[in-house]
């Protein structure tokens, strides 16, 4: 990955390259930023830049043999570590059995979060960690001579998954690194990182992407419809991983059916139906619930756009339009902001692991009141 492919963070890129060009490369660096902000993209672009044999001030060249091996993530002096679980029957728990899955996941793009990784290795609900054996293995690998004579680079994702015993095995390496070693730690939760690690690394803070940066990236790099790109960038607060997650599971059709039934039931205060719909809402899981709420916000906004006569701006399927025509009169300036706010809050609650059924039922009561409000 070249710096040109990293979304946003231009100034950080400039600083990293300037440091590398003047030979100031700290041996242990921490790229810390929220999920979906592009911390891994930056670390990867930086590693490729350090290994590139024909880099310029602006970027790695993209065509030298070193850059080429980055395209398939097969550079012999680039090492990976990440949280994993102990496979049954395996004697030593290291990341080795998961390296292929990791490469495959990374090749799909570095904008992903823990949920994608759990899914990629079929670790649903398993506790992931970085073991002591893994730390020993890292020590061994980085203790070897570099294959190509340049930097030996380790990219370690989520150092906050290291427990004290693991971190202790890493300390010597961080404090007295073997020659030519660069360790790039990529974290999401600086506050959960052990103080012993925190105090020994050079930290680079990566801010979240702005709504506009995320929106542009979603529509140009990930070919999302401009309307959805804008909405999702806002809803997910610039978190590209979350937006791409939603795209993966998106299924507008069933969301629409549920939304239409739900709004009718809320309006009629039809409690048995609302109860029944709460099952439908929660059953497919947390990601689908978030998706449904994002879809609901989209529908509410579309209704208000239509109400203000800007029909050409309305982006709805035929089926949705028919529903919106009947539903739109109940959405007006007196309730639209509050409605949108409630949906956004529910979205946040779901993301924060609040019980889906409770969120849905509570929301339904409030939606009923809002839909009944006349001004
Ligand atoms: Zn190159």
Image (cartoon, rainbow, N blue to C red):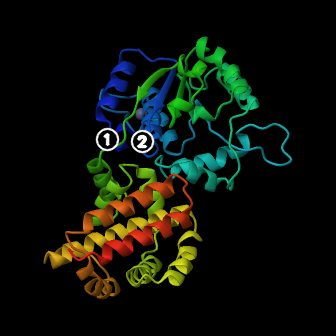
Q: Residue at point 26% right, 79% down?
A: 330
- The reply to whether residue 225 is visible in this rendering is no
Which mark, by number, is residue 8? 1
Q: Residue furthest left?
A: 309
Q: Residues within 10 Å of mark 2 (few under 14, many from 20)?
A: many
Label 2: state its secondary structure: loop
State which quadrant residue 371 falls in: bottom left
Q: Residue at point 63% right, 35% down?
A: 161
- Picture coordinates of residue 299, whole percent (x, y): 32, 73
Cβ of mark 2 under 8 A from ligand 1: no
Labelled pair 1, 2 in contact (Cβ < 8 Å): yes
Image position of 49 with respect to 310: above or below: above
Residue 210 located left or right of residue 362: left
Q: Residue at point 34% right, 33% down?
A: 59
Which mark, by number, is residue 38? 2
Image position of 254 with respect to 142: above or below: below
State which quadrant residue 230 falls in: bottom left
Q: Residue furthest top?
A: 176
- The reply to whether residue 342 is visible in this rendering is yes
- Picture coordinates of residue 244, whole percent (x, y): 44, 58
Image position of 16 with respect to 359: above or below: above
Label 1: state its secondary structure: loop
- Picture coordinates of residue 281, whole percent (x, y): 53, 72
């Amino acid at each position: 990955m070249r710096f040109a492919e990293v979304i946003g963070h231009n100034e950080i890129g400039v600083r990293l390259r300037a440091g590398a060009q003047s030979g100031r490369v700290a041996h242990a660096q921490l790229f810390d930023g929220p999920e979906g902000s592009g911390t891994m993209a930056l670390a990867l672009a930086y590693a490729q830049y350090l290994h590139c044999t024909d880099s310029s001030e602006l970027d790695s060249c993209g065509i030298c043999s070193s850059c080429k091996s980055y395209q398939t993530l097969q550079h012999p002096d680039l090492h990976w570590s990440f949280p994993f679980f102990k496979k049954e029957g395996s004697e030593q728990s290291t990341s080795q059995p998961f390296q292929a899955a990791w490469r495959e996941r990374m090749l799909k793009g570095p904008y992903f979060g823990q949920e994608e990784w759990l899914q990629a290795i079929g670790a649903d609900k398993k506790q992931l960690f970085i073991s002591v054996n893994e730390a020993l293995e890292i020590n061994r690998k980085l203790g070897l001579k570099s294959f190509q004579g340049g930097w030996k680079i380790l990219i370690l994702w989520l150092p906050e998954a290291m427990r004290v015993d693991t971190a202790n095995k890493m300390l010597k390496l961080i404090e007295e690194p073997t020659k030519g070693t660069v360790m790039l730690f990529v974290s999401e939760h600086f506050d959960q990182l052990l103080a012993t690690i925190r105090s020994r690394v050079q930290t680079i803070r990566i801010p979240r992407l702005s709504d506009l940066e995320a929106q542009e990236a979603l529509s140009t790099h990930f070919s999302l419809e401009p309307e959805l790109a804008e909405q999702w960038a806002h809803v997910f607060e610039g978190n590209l991983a979350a937006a791409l997650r939603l795209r993966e599971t998106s299924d507008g059709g069933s969301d629409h059916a549920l939304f239409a039934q739900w709004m009718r039931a809320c309006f009629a205060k039809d409690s048995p139906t609302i109860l029944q719909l709460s099952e439908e809402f929660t059953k497919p899981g947390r990601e689908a619930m978030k998706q449904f709420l994002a879809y609901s916000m989209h529908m509410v906004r579309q209704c208000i756009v239509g109400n203000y006569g800007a029909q050409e701006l309305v982006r709805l399927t035929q089926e949705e339009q028919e529903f919106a025509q009947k539903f739109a009169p109940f959405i007006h300036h007196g309730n639209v902001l509050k409605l949108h706010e409630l949906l956004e809050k529910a979205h946040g609650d779901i993301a924060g692991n609040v019980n889906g059924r409770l969120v849905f039922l509570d929301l339904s009561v409030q939606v009923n009141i809002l839909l009944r409000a006349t001004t």
